Amino acid sequence: MILKKLTAAVSALAMSASVLAYVPTGTEGNVAAADSKYNYAEALQKSMFFYEVQQAGKLPDWNYVTWRADSMVNEDGEETDVCKGGWFDAGDHFKFTLTNAYSASVLAWGYLEYKDAVDKQGLGEVYRNNVQWGLDYLMQCDRGNKIIGTIGDFKGGSTDHNIWCSAEVYLRKHHLNGGDWDRPYDEIADSTTMALSAAALAEGYLMFKDSQPDKAKAYLDQAKTYFKTADTIRKNENGAMADMYKPSSWVDDCMYAAIWLYRATGDQSYMDKVKSDYLPKFPLEDQSTDRKFTWGLCWDDTSQAAALLYAQETGDKEWVDHVSHHLDYWIDGYHNKKIDYTPDGMAWLFSWGSARHVSATAWLAQLASDTIFKDDSAHAKKYNDWAKGQMDYIFGDNGLKMSYVLGMGDNQPSAFHHRTASGIHDDHWNELGQETGGAEGWQTEYAHTLYGALVGGPDQSGKYVNQVSKYEYSEVAIDYNAGYTAALCALVDDYGGTTDPSFPPTETPKWAEWEIAATLNGSGDSYTEIKAWAMNHTAWPARVAKDIEYRYYFDISEALEKGLSAKDITVEGKSQQYKQGEQGYATVSGPYKYEGDASGNIYYALIKFEDGRAIQPTGQSEHRDEVQFRVSIPDAIDGQSTKGAWDPTNDWSYKGGISKDTDLKKANSLNKNMTMYVDGKLVWGTEPDGTEPEPYTVPGKEPVSSTTTTTTSTTTTSTTTTTVTTSTTSTVDDILWGDTNCDGTVELADAILIMQSLANPDKYGVGGSFEKPLTEKGRLNGDVDPDVKGLTSNDALAIQEYLLHIIDALPKK
């Protein structure tokens, strides 16, 4: 991440080719300025990824988080939440209109103020898409004099907080607990939630009035409606969110919304209302007539944001000074009040989400520097320098030398509070991010890197407790990232940066997603009885399947030698976890001859689930389905004992590790000689003839061809080199080396097009659907690495090395 090390900047291009949703060709950004230690453009890019991770419901086509899939859908694939879409609040599955509105508003604000800088980085489209996802959710929440407050299991057992599973299978757990597929919700008469929704939608109008005028008008109309209701009822009602979010005042939020509506409409009545109704009610310091200048911008306090907006619109010195007082309080103190600082230099407001608070105030400081203090060089420099310093603290300029942003930097928290990113299948999460899983061997490794998420941050002593259960440190949330993202927009405007053209990287599973474990339940001279678990540990993405079956292979050579035949063998089910008629019930049948064996003596028992969707990665009992079955011969035939005709020790599956001393919960019970099939495809184990599962590809995504996976000690993410070969003839005189897009110049866009064509050849490759895809000529121009024939990520790397003057000429020598 530190751009002074040019090799690190170059190596980013050599990461795995994946879906390049974030950097359209021709809109790449600048190399970071020399005085910028951190790559703010990359951080902004990854923050967008975090918001896509948080998307609820049916995912849009532009979501490229390969390990996410549709959520909150029933077994018919229908989204069942009363309001569709929106963002999950944090590492759980609640949706709060309050935090959706606050986050959408602050995100939109960052883009509106620094649109050109964001667009220059090629992030404009993905940024607008993510804001619009939040706005479209807010459009659905109107209930007349009320608004949807919370969607989620806030009643009874609270599945959202008490159960740890991925979003994609959450609703199945809800259905298991409650019998229905519809999550509860409430309606609240809350001015804060309505006002913040109004502000966000008014900003949405400003963002989309030129590109999507009809939708923008709908946003504005709804913003007016929300504001009118908020201003009419003038009260706070928290409803189901009271234990988590409890707004304390509506005045600041209505003032904030009114100014945004004034900006969107030019209607003076909104500013008149601010002056007549809200300024006189502006909160005061305790036991003082001073307007409140302490605390900071967050979902519960938009007073300082409203003050800055008012100062921007009016230029009123009294309010410009007020903003200065607030920022001084955060920096060096005002009126004998000063925020606390950690020993290593972070302005520290509160124990829960300290990094969230300081980054939101950094956003206000940067914006104030660039607007109301732009002609006051001393104040502008003071506030801008402080904001940058605090943001750099978050990225690693701290006593722990740790980045509080996941997926950024070499040292970051290993434990963070996020269910879907964890890939937990058995509802046991306490050991996540720790060095050991204890005596039981519980899961310690996260399935996924939660790129771009801002964790809570340090305590007042500068200490960070790296435990999932310490939520004040390890929580991530959409409101945490809101002010942080807006601040990044300003930093990108000041310092530039480079987005990563190969982001997000391709993930491959870190563990087997489908497994069979088996133990010996009993045995005798004429039988073998097996107890087995079929297990679903999917996380790429978490999912269920209806068609699941597995096989137990056995060799009948000794039976044949004693004069028996396959007809004398009985395969029968004993006890099992589910009853007939329930999902998860299995039929046990056989014997079936295995056609892959030349001797013809290998047969198998087939255990087939009538509906395997009951095997779901949502808990300690649900992630596996237990079936006990027996394979046997008669004790005697025609009065003659069959003793010696049954010997399991030469059976393929028995040799996979069947033992009476094995516990199904232990890793040594896993049996790779029992094969498992999902939707007719081999997913676990090895057949007797050596047939193994094919390499895994993420469902719904195009597989990447010719991949080689390598790992290093500094990252948990695999890097992939993808090769596309071709046979094209041309003369050297025709070639402009490096000019992949054939526009007559060699630039970063050429490297980006290479990576795009590798990751998504149907769109960006030769003949692809993109407006300006790769051409045969461009493919030849871009083949600048002589060590590998055809385009690879090494060619993109060489082009960037050339642009950074690390090499003098192309092709690379």
Image (cartoon, rainbow, N blue to C red):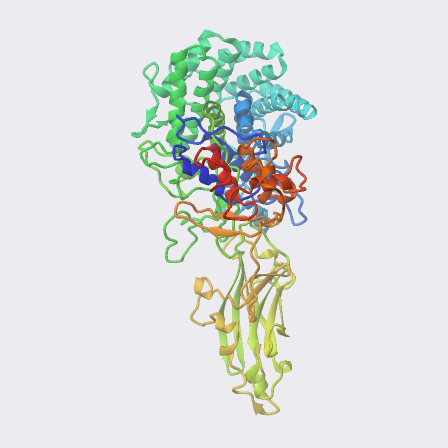
Residue 435, given in percent of the width and then of the height, sits at: 36, 50
Residue 119, given in percent of the width and then of the height, sits at: 56, 26
Q: Residue furthest left?
A: 343
Pick whichever, 33 or 580, lies toward us: 33
Name the image quarter holding residue 292: top left
Query: What is the count of numbered marks?
Result: 0
Q: Vertical placement of 318 versus 141: above or below?
A: above
Q: Residue furthest right?
A: 214
Pick whichever, 685 or 41, lies toward us: 41
Residue 146, given in percent of the width and then of the height, sits at: 61, 27
Q: Vertical placement of 544 versus 12: above or below?
A: below
Q: Vertical placement of 492 versus 562: above or below?
A: above
Left or right placement of residue 303 versus residue 605 in this view: left
Name the image quarter holding the N terminus: top left
Pick whichever, 796 or 250, lies toward us: 796
Residue at position x 41%, y 15% in the image: 380
Q: Is residue 520 visible?
A: no
Pick whichever, 223 or 191, lies toward us: 223
Q: Residue furthest top?
A: 317
Q: Can residue 219 be seen in this view?
A: yes
Left or right placement of residue 657 versus residue 400 in this view: right
Residue at position x 43%, y 20% in the image: 365
Residue 673, given in percent of the width and then of the height, sits at: 52, 68
